[in-house]
Image (cartoon, helix red, strand yellow):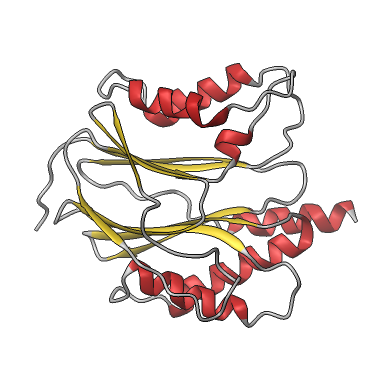
Amino acid sequence: MDSEYNMARELQEQFLPLPLPTFMGLSIDYTYKPSPNISGDFFDMHSFGKNKLGFIILDVVGKGLPAIFITIRIHSLFHSLITPEQSPKEVLSTLNKELSKLSVNKKSCACVYLELNIKEMQVKYADAGMGVAYLCRENTLIELRAEGGLMLGMMADSEYTEGTIGLHKDDVIIIGSDGLTDIENEEGIRFGDDRLNAILKAYQPHTGVSIKQTLDRAFETFSASIVTPKDDLTFLTFEILKETNIN
């Protein structure tokens, strides 16, 4: 059984879209630390030309081999059905309908989809019950969960909405699973929303330490004595380094 789990984990990690792309004026980074069991977390991306990117991050309900099946299926759907013309709400709707067709008991997953348009300096988003989704601007957090709908796979006819926000220099976006807030220290205390939000609000760009590095250090310090984490830790970060207008 251990060999099957190891093979499944390796297969899952091979589907991660690495290395992440580089764009003038935009820094993209990630942390992906699966739990000892096969991870229910996953992220993927599309590059629609040189100006538009689509990112999806999801957290499947449950772990083990059923979770790997769902993540592989979504990876396949994401790359075979999603087109540049589809908006975030259409992306979630398409994935939800296809996921609902699966004949497995546990097929629900939290998810958020972001469409970054580098030329127009804007982000469109749709959330389906994801744990963390924020835009950080001048020590203020804008939650990217106001638009969207139910978790994927719950109801085949679910409808989704989407939001649009213009981007400014020094904006930071973070999307991630609930592992960011559910991580525990040796006393069983959760990292929690308040601690995460305080770090995001206090973050200052242009110090030589990225938001990804800042969060990694905070998590490592908080749970330094924990050898085997209980949950996955997965998040993507986007930092707008300067105003861009790529033609």
The tally of labels here is: 0
Where 235 falls versus 59 (above or below)? above
Where 94 falls versus 41 (above or below)? below
Horizontal and vertical percent position of residue 210: 36, 27
Q: Nearer the viewer, residue 106 or 43?
A: 106
**At 60% across and 71% down in the image, what residue appears?**
153
Quarter placement of the N terminus? bottom right
User: Image check: 225 left or right of 147?
Assistant: right
**At 55% across and 36% down in the image, what residue appears?**
180
User: Image check: 175 left or right of 2?
Assistant: left
The residue most toward the right is 1
Where 119 falls versus 30 (above or below)? below
Q: Quadrant of residue 45?
A: bottom left
Q: Nearer the viewer, residue 17 or 131?
A: 131
Q: Nearer the viewer, residue 124 or 225?
A: 124
**At 57% across and 43% down in the image, what residue appears?**
178
User: Image check: 5 left or right of 92?
Assistant: right
Horizontal and vertical percent position of residue 145: 40, 52
Quarter placement of the C terminus? bottom left
Horizontal and vertical percent position of residue 241: 21, 35
Q: Quadrant of residue 3?
A: bottom right
**At 68% across and 50% down in the image, what residue appears?**
39
Horizontal and vertical percent position of residue 240: 24, 39
User: Image check: 159 left or right of 163?
Assistant: right
Q: Quadrant of residue 242?
A: top left
